[in-house]
Image (cartoon, helix red, strand yellow):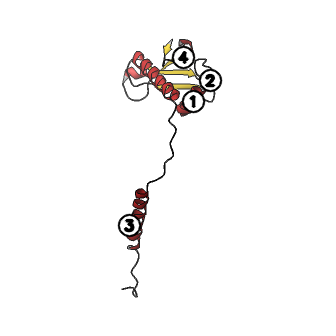
Amino acid sequence: MIRISEEIELGEEELSEKYIRSSGPGGQNVNKVATAVQLRFNALLSPNLSDYVRLRLLKLAGSRATLEGEIIIEADRFRTREQNRADALERLKELIIAAAKRPKRRVKTKPTKASKERRIEAKKGRATVKRGRTKVRAEDS
């Protein structure tokens, strides 16, 4: 079991890994060894996630989520499989933790009188600057 938080634990069978070749420069090692990891987690079928966490997770995952509800995380920052696997797992954990947090509700506030006055003064100042940019006509001078 992989412990995400006190409420959420994932089973090893829910994750699948595939090792792929890293992209970019790196000489012969990059061309020969598949050190990058592609971690797959099916959020839709996971029995350990609540509906709320599942929906937020898919929303937060963005382009990393497929239409089937699978989240794909690729890690190729390091030279070894073990480090890349740990990196991908950590990134998945962070994503699930972020999805489990309920966002604070925004409390509506009214602008203060002083802030309204500052806004109006700023607008008047900009208007004056723009008025100063107009062409001067002969009858005005």
Q: Secondary structure at mark 4?
A: strand
- Nearer-the-camera pick, 131 or 31: 131
Instruction: Give me the C-alpha separation between circle 4 and circle 2.
Output: 13 Å
Residue at 38% across, 22% down: 78
Instruction: Give me the C-alpha separation between circle 2 and circle 3.
Output: 55 Å
On the question of residue 33 being in view, the answer is no
Query: As shown in the figure, which amino acid type bears the numbered disc 3?
Result: Gly
Q: Which residue is mark 1?
A: 58
Q: Earlier in the sequence, mark 2 or mark 1?
A: 2
Q: Secondary structure at mark 2?
A: loop
Closest to the camera, between mark 3 and mark 4, is 3
Q: Secondary structure at mark 1?
A: helix
Closest to the camera, between mark 4 and mark 1, is 1
Residue 68 placed where, x, y %? 63, 26
Quarter residue 27 falls in: top left
Q: Which residue is mark 4?
A: 15
- Nearer-the-camera pick, 122 or 66: 122
Q: Earlier in the sequence, mark 4 or mark 1?
A: 4
Q: Tags 4 and 1 in contact by the CB under 8 Å rule? A: no
Q: Which residue is mark 2?
A: 44
Q: Which residue is mark 3?
A: 125
Quarter residue 75 falls in: top left
Q: Earlier in the sequence, mark 2 or mark 3?
A: 2
Query: As shown in the figure, which amino acid type bears the numbered disc 2?
Result: Leu
Q: Earlier in the sequence, mark 1 or mark 3?
A: 1
Tell me if mark 3 has few (under 14), some (14-19) or many (20+) residues whose alpha carbon lies within 10 angstroms of its own. few
Query: As shown in the figure, which amino acid type bears the numbered disc 1?
Result: Leu
- Nearer-the-camera pick, 29 or 98: 98
